[in-house]
């Protein structure tokens, strides 16, 4: 399980780095999240079968990182949505001005 926890931590770090980039590569994020999900499924199974593991500090840290990643992704998605809304508004304005040309 330590290997899976280590892989999960590495993926979390990599995902977080990609979320900080100006231009987000959604394909890379998607691939990393899929990989993370596979590892997480193994760990969740282990946690459900082993109470000692489910109470361990490394597992609790993994849960906290998951929560932080979800929040990061939600903030990024919200920011992208806001930018898209401004782009659409600007595009509408351009279309209005083009009517006068």
Image (spheres, helix red, strand yellow):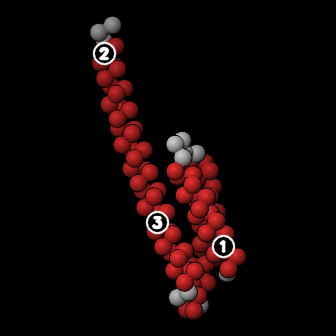
Residue that label 3 marks? 68
Residue 38 appears in the rendering: no
Mark 2 = which residue?
Answer: 97
Q: Please, is residue 10 above or below residue 100 in the view? A: below
Q: How dense is the environment of label 2, judged by Cα within 10 Å: few (below 14), some, or many (20 and up)?
A: few
Secondary structure of the residue carrying tag 1 is helix
Tell me what residue is drawn at x 41 percent, y 54 percent. 75
Give the mark, 2 or 3, whose residue is nearer the N terminus: 3
User: Dot 3 surroundings within 10 Å: few (below 14), some, or many (20 or more)?
Assistant: some
- Residue that mark 1 sits on: 6
Please name which of the two marks, 2 or 3, marks the residue nearer to the observer: 3
Task: Decide which of tag 2 and tag 1 comes sooner along the chain.
Answer: 1
Separation of marks 2 and 3 at Cα, in angstroms: 44 Å
User: Pointers 1 and 3 in contact (CB under 8 A)?
Assistant: no
Q: Is residue 11 shown to the viewer in this render?
A: yes
Extreme residue in the top direction? 101
């Amino acid at each position: 399980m330590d290997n899976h926890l280590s892989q999960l931590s590495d993926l979390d770090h990599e995902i977080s780095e990609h979320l900080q980039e100006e231009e987000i590569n959604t394909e890379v994020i998607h691939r990393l999240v899929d990989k993370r999900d596979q590892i997480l499924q193994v760990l969740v199974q282990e946690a459900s079968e082993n109470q000692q593991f489910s109470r361990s500090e490394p597992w609790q840290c993994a849960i906290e990182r998951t929560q932080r990643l979800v929040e990061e992704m939600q903030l990024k998605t919200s920011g992208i949505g806001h930018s898209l809304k401004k782009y659409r508004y600007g595009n509408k304005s351009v279309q209005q001005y083009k009517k006068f040309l």
